[in-house]
Image: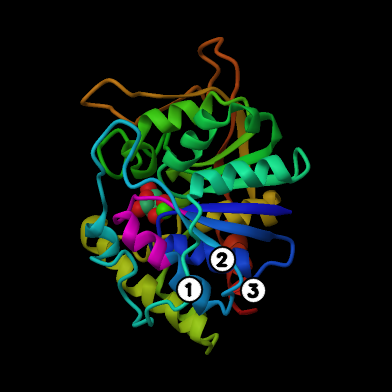
């Protein structure tokens, strides 16, 4: 399966990228960076650091949007650290950043490849994907599926009481993507908060004994301190790798085809995903909204894939 990962690394983005690069079922055509957890100059750099960690300097990395469609950028250094990838001591990348803009790469790839053969995997704010759809509406019917991490339903928000970070940062982009007409799978906080890397599970990554295993363990050590201090939880949720796990083993997840709309106007609930889980409205379904996962199966899959690098 051909995929493009659109990302704002982010420790959990990094683990998602590593898992994808380790999986022979997935052909990563390119990685497109977007501003999100940290500004674009850092996310594109981090994406290249992660490719080099995986030994995959052949993966083209593109820089995309510096800021959301209509709003100033909100970042999350309080979770991910100043660099976005705090934790391990990884060298600066030597592989080049591609000159082409990420949005143009997405458009060109979808136009070039056979219709229905390319899946988009956005694991940051949806700015690049929305910009591509606005600039080239002809690509929408060519997208095999959009498999995104974002939103929340029962689990409410993590950046405000109502909103999940990726959707909150660029709600207009998210609303546009939900109405693009492409098949969509949503991995919301309801699921990703069950994908917890506890201390014991992180020790399993460390015990892989490889540079990748060690780096992932150190990323998680850093990243989980926020959840430990804030919520008193054991471990941290690996949000973004849930997208890759869904692509590899959808049987680990359960969900429903429902309607999802994004609140763009209210100051109080901006970025809230209004997910009609109980079909209360007659608005047509526009997304497969995932509600649950087999956490141990997810962790075993991730360990297996990281162990291959
Ligand atoms: C999402 O926000 C980011 O901080 C993470 O990388 C993830 O994509 C979780 O809300
Ligand atoms: Ca992310």
- Residue at image point 70% right, 60% down: 26
Query: How many angstroms separate mark 3 from mark 2 (CA)?
Result: 9 Å
- Residue at image point 34% right, 50% down: 36
Q: Nearer the viewer, mark 1 or mark 3?
A: 3
Mark closer to the chain start, 1 or 3: 1
Query: How many angstroms separate mark 1 from mark 2 (CA)?
Result: 8 Å
Q: Does the stretch in magenta take in 201?
A: no
The answer to which image quadrant residue 144 occupies is top right
The answer to which image quadrant residue 40 occupies is bottom left
- Residue at image point 48% right, 58% down: 99
Q: Residues within 10 Å of mark 1 (few under 14, many from 20)?
A: some
Mark carried by residue 201 = 1
Would you say the residues marked 1 and 2 are in contact, meaning their CB atoms lie under 8 Å apart? Answer: yes
Coordinates of residue 275 in the picture (x, y in percent): 47, 26
Q: Where 177 sits versus 59, above or below?
A: above
Q: Does the stretch in magenta take in 39?
A: yes
Q: Quadrant of the C terminus?
A: bottom right
Mark closer to the chain start, 1 or 2: 1
Query: How many angstroms separate mark 1 from mark 3 (CA)?
Result: 13 Å
Which residue is denoted by mark 3 in the rendering? 304
Which residue is denoted by mark 2 in the rendering? 299
Q: Which residues are magenta?
A: 33-46
């Amino acid at each position: 399966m051909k995929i493009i990962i659109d990302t704002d690394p982010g420790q959990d983005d990094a683990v998602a990228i590593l898992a994808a690069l380790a999986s022979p079922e997935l052909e990563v055509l390119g990685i497109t960076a977007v501003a999100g957890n940290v500004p674009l100059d850092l996310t594109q750099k981090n994406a290249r650091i992660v490719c080099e960690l995986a030994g995959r300097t052949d993966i083209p990395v593109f820089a995309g949007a510096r800021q959301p469609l209509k709003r100033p950028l909100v970042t999350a250094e309080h979770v991910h650290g100043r660099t976005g990838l705090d934790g391990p001591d990884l060298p600066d990348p030597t592989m080049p950043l591609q000159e082409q803009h990420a949005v143009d790469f997405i458009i060109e790839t979808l136009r070039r490849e056979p219709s229905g053969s390319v899946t988009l995997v956005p694991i940051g704010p949806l700015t690049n994907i929305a910009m591509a759809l606005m600039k080239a509406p002809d690509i929408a019917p060519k997208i095999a599926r959009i498999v995104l991490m974002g939103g929340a339903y029962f689990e409410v928000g993590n950046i405000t009481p109502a909103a999940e970070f990726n959707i909150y940062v660029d709600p207009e982009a998210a609303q546009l993507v939900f109405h693009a007409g492409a098949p969509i799978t949503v991995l919301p906080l309801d699921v990703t908060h069950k994908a917890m890397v506890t201390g014991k599970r992180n020790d399993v990554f460390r015990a892989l004994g490889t540079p990748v295993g060690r780096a992932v363990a150190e990323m998680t050590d850093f990243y989980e301190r926020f959840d430990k201090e804030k919520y008193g939880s054991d471990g941290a949720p690996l949000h973004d790798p849930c997208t890759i796990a869904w692509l590899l083993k959808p049987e680990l997840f359960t969900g429903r085809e429902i309607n999802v709309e994004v609140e763009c106007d209210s100051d109080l609930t901006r970025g809230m995903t209004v997910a009609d889980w109980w079909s209360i409205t007659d608005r047509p379904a526009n997304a497969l909204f995932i509600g649950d996962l087999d956490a141990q199966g997810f962790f075993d899959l991730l360990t297996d894939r990281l162990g291959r690098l």
